[in-house]
Image (spheres, grey):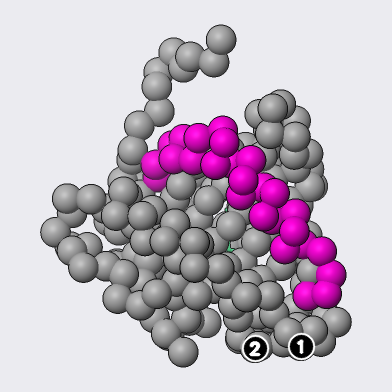
Amino acid sequence: MNAELFPRSRTEVAPGAVHVPDWLDAGRQRELLEACRDWSRPPAGLRTVHTPGGGTMTSQQVCLGWHWYPYGYARTVVDGDGAPVKPFPEWLDELGRRAVADAFGGDDAFEGEPTAPYDIALINFYDADARMGMHRDSDEKSDAPVVSLSLGDTCVFRFGNTQSRTRPYTDVELRSGDLFVFGGPARLAYHGVPRVHPGTAPEELGLTGRLNVTLRASGF
Ligand SMILES: O=C(O)CCC(=O)C(=O)O
């Protein structure tokens, strides 16, 4: 039995930032995982990202639509094998728009969002030791909300403020199938993943580790 003593519900973590637990059912999670496995294969597959300051990101990444590198976007994997970035499928745009509608449904401040189609996906894979430091998603021109989907292991997702990497922030537990959307006044908030809880993925999913898919609109 998997019943929660205190069922999780939609929560507005900050103005414009919404957590929707269990947004993807088990079947949809499996489909998205299979797609992530395909996208991870070379060419333009899963890669380790190095920052200009000499750092190495502990999560591994693959991109669709536009290739993100620190700190910009390109049409080819300029910091990897040089291959053209994989195409962004239309169904991911539909998924992104549905996610925004479900997260902000009935919220007048988000009436009409997003203004641009989703055309970028960043897929991050976290093993047990991987983390992501506090950062802002600020390399896009569009201010359409960022849509984040989680698969596999549970993580601590730290959602902060637009001014600094430090407090105030809120730690949210993101589990497999959860949706997190941030737009409007929260679009440029600092956020990160300080911790992954290994071995917490749903057994039937068949994933060791955590995958996060963020959908963004480039506005390019
Ligand atoms: O893994 C996550 O939940 C966050 C990913 C993230 O912050 C990013 O892709 O910019």
Q: Residue at x 83, y 74 (%)?
A: 43
Instruction: Name the residue at 32% across, 50% down.
Output: 103
**Circle 1 is placed at which residue position?**
78
Q: Which residue is drawn at 50% across and 35% down?
A: 25
Question: SS for tag 1?
Answer: loop
Above or below, comparing residue 218 to residue 42 in the picture? below
Magenta stretch contains residue 57: no
- Residue that badge 2 annotates: 74
Q: Quadrant of the N terminus?
A: top right
Q: How far apart are marks 2 and 1 (CA)?
A: 7 Å
The front one of 218 and 94 is 94
User: Are the residues at dot 2 and dot 1 in contact (C-beta closer than 8 Å)?
Assistant: yes
Q: Is residue 109 above or below residue 26?
A: below
- The segment highlighted magenta reads 19-44
**Is disc 1 surrounded by few (<14), some (14 to 19) or many (20+) residues within 10 Å?**
some
Residue 86 x, y percent position in the rendering: 68, 75
Residue 18 % position (x, y): 35, 49
Residue 25 visible at all: yes
Q: Residue furthest front?
A: 90
Look at the image and tell me whether residue 68 can be seen.
Answer: no
